Image (tube, grey):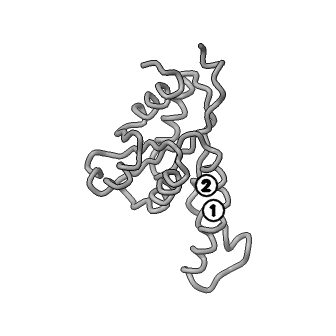
């Protein structure tokens, strides 16, 4: 069976936006010639933060601005998570990615296979999220190999 015989997988890439991990995974999957479609939340910080007030109107309090933005962003994230075959969540060390933790929880609740990626020094902090994952990787290259194996059944 070739990869061409496999229906394309939709893979949701969630998590930190301060490194090029998404690009590394995309390049690795392209090099492996895997039948995948990559989707993600909005990764432009300003756009994600301001979408609610830009579309629905200003708020006088940051709490309500963030609340409105979170709900508008959820239109995208919930829809894409539900349509995904696999979810990859990366946690970086620079910022706390509460949204990624939430999306990991949503993926687990939806019964979506979950791969978590983070550095070893975050293992204790992320132990509950790691426990929900089917695999915990340290590098984008390991994520690519996990996806390649899942799709092809080959090492």
Considering only vertical position in the picture, is 123 above or below 51? above
Residue at far top of view: 1
Q: Is residue 120 left or right of residue 23?
A: left
Pointer 1 or 2: first along the chain: 2
Residue 7 coordinates in the image, percent (x, y): 66, 27
In this view, the residue in front, 6 or 122, is 6
Q: Image quadrant for the C terminus? A: top left
Q: Going 38% across and 37% down the picture, which residue do you hit?
A: 139
**Vertical order, 100 against 84 (above or below):** below
Provide residue 93's location: percent of width, then percent of height. Answer: 34, 54
Q: Are marks 1 and 2 in contact (CB under 8 Å)?
A: yes
Q: Quadrant of the N terminus?
A: top right
Relative height, residue 149 to residue 143 (above, below): above
Quick one: which residue is furthest to the bottom in this view? 60
* Residue found 57% across the figure and 26% down from its top: 30
Q: Name the one closer to the observer, 40 or 107.
A: 107
Query: On the picture, is 26 further left or further right than 122?
Result: right
Residue plotted at (27% across, 45% down): 120
Judging depth in this view, the residue of 105 and 19 nearest the camera is 105
Using a 10 Å C-alpha cutoff, classify the residue at mark 1 as few (fewer than 14 neighbours), some (14 to 19) or many (20 or more).
Answer: some
Quarter-wise, where is residue 12 in the image? top right
> What's the residue at 50%, 35% (across, down)?
25
**Mark 1, mark 2: which one is toward the viewer?**
1
Residue holding disc 1 = 73
Q: Residue 40 at x, y = what percent?
A: 59, 48
The residue tagged 2 is: 42
Residue 106: give its label. none
């Amino acid at each position: 069976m070739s990869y061409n015989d496999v229906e394309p997988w939709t893979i949701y890439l969630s998590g930190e936006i301060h490194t090029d991990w998404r690009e590394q995974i995309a390049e690795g999957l392209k090099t492996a010639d895997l039948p995948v479609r990559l989707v993600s939340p909005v990764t432009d910080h300003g756009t994600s933060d301001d979408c609610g007030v830009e579309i629905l109107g200003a708020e006088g309090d940051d709490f309500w601005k963030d609340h409105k933005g979170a709900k508008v962003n959820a239109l995208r994230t919930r829809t894409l998570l539900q349509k995904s075959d696999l979810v990859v969540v990366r946690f970086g060390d620079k910022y706390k990615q509460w949204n990624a933790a939430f999306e990991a929880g949503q993926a687990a609740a939806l019964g979506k296979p979950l791969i978590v990626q983070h550095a070893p020094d975050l293992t204790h902090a992320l132990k509950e999220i790691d426990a929900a994952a089917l695999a915990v990787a340290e590098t984008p290259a390991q994520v690519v190999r996990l996806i390649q194996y899942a799709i092809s059944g080959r090492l």
